[in-house]
Amino acid sequence: NPYVPWGENPSGALFIVVALLSLVYSRKKKRGTLDTIIILVVLGVVLGMSLSACQQPTPSSPAPGGGNQPTPPPSIGGPAGPTPTQNPTPQPNGTPVPTAQPISCPIASTLTNKFRITADEITSAGGTMMDYFQKEVKDDPALFMARVAMGESADNGERSRIIWLITTRVVLGFNNSNLRSSATMESSIWDHFGPPSSLHRELLETSPNGGYQFEDVHKALSITDPPAQATGNILTMLYPDDSEISDFESMYKVAQEAYGAQNEAALKTTSNSDLAIIKGYDGYLAPNKGVTAGITHFRGGRSTQQFSSSSGNIWDDEYPMDDVFFGMISCKDEKNLIRLVYDPSSNGQGAWLAKLFAKSDPDQIACPN
């Protein structure tokens, strides 16, 4: 019977009863109180039954003796897929009767499927989370930036600042530098870390000191089925629940703006409040890295700062190149400050800065125009 809420057309349950009531009572010239009560009761019952069609069915226990069980319906808000086919149920007389599929009700955001990563999507991308991340960086770089930020912090302000830090590191080529390596940098680079970089280079490859700036990305690489295996902030990054979708959508919009500013001119002129806060900061470190608030790594630099108590992480200004790029200190002034502490025989600040530029005297290094 198609005119019941557990059939294929629950709206028919409403229309057929309304039609029957219309046929009965349209012939009556006068209706009494009892007639009115009957109409209201019937309509109320039918409406309630129709609404119940949107409820997910409770999985039944396996039938005795094993055998194939019916495939459960897709999860609410999960990735879109082909419409499930109906499984014919054999009847005693041998005539198959289609088994109706349950009707699911989608959640509000149309981006839910985009934010959630499933095992099937990982398999389709190549079989590993790295394969999936590489595909997402190529197909929708802003989405991947938002995903990283969602995993790194539970605070939206901090997440937005992380997105702008990623953008800054890409434009100034942080992972393309030779910072803290035995090699030396080009002597002409005073307002860049190195040649312009990429999201793949900054987020999916090691930094100059051999580690990863955003470690949660790399913790997620072993996951092959996010809803089943991931927990905590890794689950938020890979498969956010309904309560996190709105925040994810907000960060996606921030990332789209930031990705549009991934060039020198735009980065210097963008008037974004979160970017303004983190200009000069080139690192974002967990407390277990041994960095505390209030430390200044070089003269003229910004002292380390904790902007969000909920994350506990420290913003670090370890190198002067981004400070010079944003005009927070002039190249000439930075050279003078380096000269004051320069001592090639020590392991102090002046030694490693001089080594970076392959010069024994900061005065020999030309500032950019």
Image (cartoon, grey):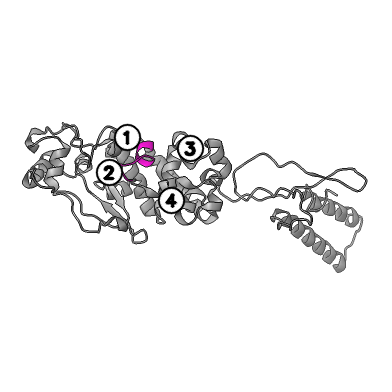
Q: Residue at x 53, y 54 (%)?
A: 241
Find residue 323 and report its image quarter: top left
Residue at disc 4, secondary structure: helix
Task: Identify the mark nearer the N-term, 3 or 1.
Answer: 3
- For the magenta stretch, what is the residue range? 200-211
Query: Mark 3 is on which residue type?
Result: Asp
Query: Mark 2 is on which residue type?
Result: Asn
Task: Identify the mark nearer the N-term, 4 or 3.
Answer: 3
Task: Identify the mark nearer the N-term, 2 or 3.
Answer: 3
- Is there a contact, CB below 8 Å, between mark 3 and mark 1? no
Q: Which residue is mark 4?
A: 150
Q: Which residue is mark 2?
A: 209
Q: Give the dominant element type of the magenta stretch: helix, strand or loop.
A: loop
Question: Where 38 falls versus 230 (above or below)?
Answer: below
The alpha-carbon separation of the residues under discs 1 and 4 comes to 22 Å
Task: Identify the mark nearer the N-term, 4 or 2.
Answer: 4
The alpha-carbon separation of the residues under discs 4 and 2 comes to 25 Å
Q: Which residue is mark 1?
A: 197
Closer to us: mark 3 or mark 1? 3
Image quarter hosting the C terminus: top left
In the rendered structure, does residue 209 fall within the stretch colored magenta? Answer: yes
Mark 3 crowd level (few <14, some 14–19, many ≥20, 10 Å Cα):
some
Q: Which residue is mark 3?
A: 131
Q: Residue furthest front?
A: 65
Question: Where 71 falls versus 171 (above or below)?
Answer: below
Find residue 134 and report its image quarter: top left
Where is residue 255? Give x, y as percent. Answer: 40, 43
